Structures are given as C-alpha cells and as structure tokens.
Image (cartoon, rainbow, N blue to C red):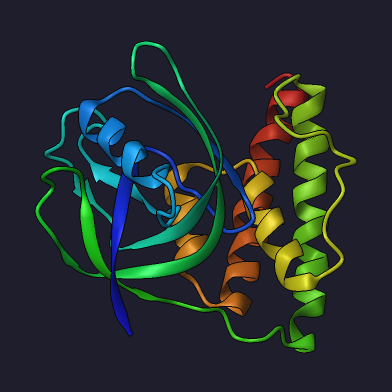
Amino acid sequence: MSRHLPIFPLGSVLLPMQLLPLHVFEPRYRELMDCLTAPGAATELGVVLIERGREVGGGDQRVSVGTTSHLVESEMLPDGRWLAVFAGAGRFRVVDWLPDDPYPRAVVEDLPDPAWDSADDAALAAAEEEVRQALAMAAELQEATVAPGFQLAADPARRAWQLCAVAPLGPLDRQRLLEAPTAIRLATLATEVAEVKRMLAFRLSGG
C-alpha cells in the first residue's frame, strides 16, 4: 500500500538500525522540522541518497530506494536551526515524487524484509568476520570510526543491518546493500569489505 512521506535527501545513506544526527538549517527543512515536532504529529521521515547534485538548494537527482526513520531527539536553536537525531527503521521505494514545495515529499511503498532464514546464518558470520577484520586494520591506521570490539544485537536480522552500518564502505556501496535482498546483501557486504581489506593491507605494508 502506498502512502505519502516527507523526504530528506542526503549525500550519505541511512540504513535500518542506524542513527542519523542532522543539523537542519535550510528554511524548507526547518519547516519540515516544525511539522515533525508539532503536538500529535507523525515523526516519520524518509531519507534517500542524492545520486547527483548537492544537499543544499534543491535540483538534485535522487535514488528511488531509501530508509524510513523516526525522530528520537530534537532541539530548536535560538536562530531557528534544529539539531535532531533520527533512527533508521525500514526500507521504502519511491513510487512518485511530489512537488518539493514546501519540502521534498514522495508517494512511497514499504519494502519489508522477509523473516530471517537460518540458511543465511553462515553468510552473516562470514560478513561479520570480514567487517571486524577491516575495522581492526583501519584502527591500526587510526582511521576506524567504530571500535573493532563493538557489540551487535543477538537478533540476526538486526545484526546484519548493524554490520552494514559500521562497515567501512562508501555511499554507493551502502546503497547497493540497502537495495539488495538479504542473502545478496550479506554476500555483497563480505565481497566489498574484503576489497577494502586488501587496500588497507597494502597501506599497512607501507605501500
């Protein structure tokens, strides 16, 4: 079933189970924050990657698969800017873009993941090993954004998304993970991170 959703286009990818801190300063997004924080208002926001263009000013080209998120914390600053934190939830596909006035909106359809299949347990374990090794190598280069000993959820579906969120990958790789079915997502994660490990190993060797 389709529904309307306010959208925040970004130069980065938000994944389910990931937190997104935002500094909101553009007038159109200030207006959006006013709506999201009004008493009794829905606090759901869609986040999509900007494929071409910039975050500020509009006129950007956006991907069609994004992540729904919920506002978990917000603070309005004296000059009207906002500091906010959103939590990634599920995935959606844009059916139709609506006019950007007063802020970007779209007609979307949710893309729920199927129930976890135990056949994917081995792929999850392999992907986790690759991610932890890559982060340990990045830590040696003092470039890790997450400590190698980080804790993950026991639930395998949540664990898989958390691994995607902390993996040292760029926006386009993360977008591929977001769009892929679970089994392909885990295989892609392991493959992409293995490539990152090769580059990190080369740098650690002094190359």
Residue found farthest to the right: 149
> Residue 55: horizontal and vertical position, in percent?
27, 32
Please tell me which residue lies in front, 53 or 58: 58
Q: Is residue 135 left or right of residue 13?
A: right
Q: Height in image: 130 above or below 73?
A: below
Q: Is residue 58 left or right of residue 69?
A: left
Which residue is rendered at x = 59% and y = 54% of the image?
Answer: 192
Question: Which quarter of the rendered picture does the C terminus lie within?
Answer: top right
> Residue 65: horizontal and vertical position, in percent?
36, 64
Question: Which quarter of the rendered picture does the N terminus lie within?
Answer: bottom left
Please tell me which residue lies in front, 6 or 120: 6
Q: Is residue 11 left or right of residue 207?
A: left
Residue found farthest to the front: 39
Which residue is rendered at x = 69% and y = 33% of the image?
Answer: 200
Please tell me which residue lies in front, 199 or 57: 57
Number of numbered discs on residues: 0
> Residue 125: horizontal and vertical position, in percent?
83, 67
Which residue is rendered at x = 45% and y = 53% of the image?
Answer: 43
> Residue 193: horizontal and vertical position, in percent?
65, 50
Residue found farthest to the top: 79
Q: Height in image: 146 above or below 140?
A: below
